[in-house]
Amino acid sequence: MIPQFILPSNLQLKAHTIYPEPGVLCINTSACQKYSACPICRKRSNRIHSRYLRTLLDLPISGHLARVKLKARKYFCDNAVCPRKVFTERFDYEIRPYYRRMVRSNDLLVRMALELGGNTGAAISRYVETLSAHRLYCV
């Protein structure tokens, strides 16, 4: 059983498996929203077009990076006058379009950079980004 506190409680995600890799905890999840709204016309849709895999970094867990592998969906837009015919699933909290990390993880990085300021903040944020990118894409 996967503890509920690992993923944000305000997200409609279902965690399937969690497994360790060197320095990283990988969490396989899927979205369990009943519908999603088109980003252009805001019409809700529940007709699924396809699925795709999205990888997001989250806050560290027990000193390990947390990588969330999210099986998200694409939907058909049923509004005949909308120029967008297919759109990706949208989430209200914690996951923004095109982001590669959860909002809470991004906020922590921003706060750390602002608090440290100047060259020290830039050096640490570059180190964290390099470390995150290496572990995210090279494993």
Image (cartoon, rainbow, N blue to C red):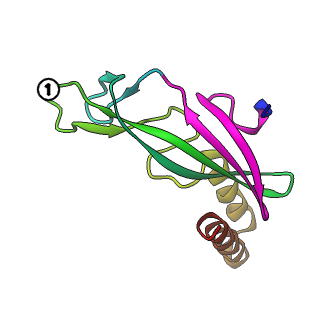
Residue 43's quadrant in the figure? Answer: top left
Q: Is residue 32 magenta?
A: yes
Asked whether, in this view, residue 2 is left or right of residue 102, the answer is right
Q: Position of residue 73 (x, y in %)?
A: 42, 37
In this rendering, is residue 128 above or below 76? below
In this rendering, is residue 137 above or below 67? below
- Tell me the residue at 69%/29% (across/down): 9
Q: Is residue 132 magenta?
A: no
- Tell me the residue at 64%/58% (across/down): 110
Seen from this angle, which residue lies furthest left?
81
- Tell me the residue at 74%/62% (across/down): 115
Asked whether, in this view, residue 79 is left or right of residue 57, the answer is left
Residue 112's quadrant in the figure? Answer: bottom right
Viewport quadrant of the N terminus? top right
Report the amino acid beneath label 1: Ala
| Residue 11 visible, this orientation | no
Q: Position of residue 25 (x, y in %)?
A: 75, 53
Asked whether, in this view, residue 122 is left or right of residue 83, the answer is right
Residue range of the region highlighted in magenta in the rendering: 5-33
**Secondary element type, mark 1:** loop
- Tell me the residue at 33%/23% (across/down): 45
Q: Nearer the viewer, residue 94 or 61?
A: 61
Give the residue number, with chain letter if any, for mark 1.
80
Viewport quadrant of the C terminus? bottom right
Seen from this angle, which residue lies furthest right?
62
Circle 1 residues within 10 Å: few <14, some 14–19, many ≥20: few
In this rendering, is residue 127 above or below 82? below
Q: Position of residue 50 (x, y in %)?
A: 36, 38
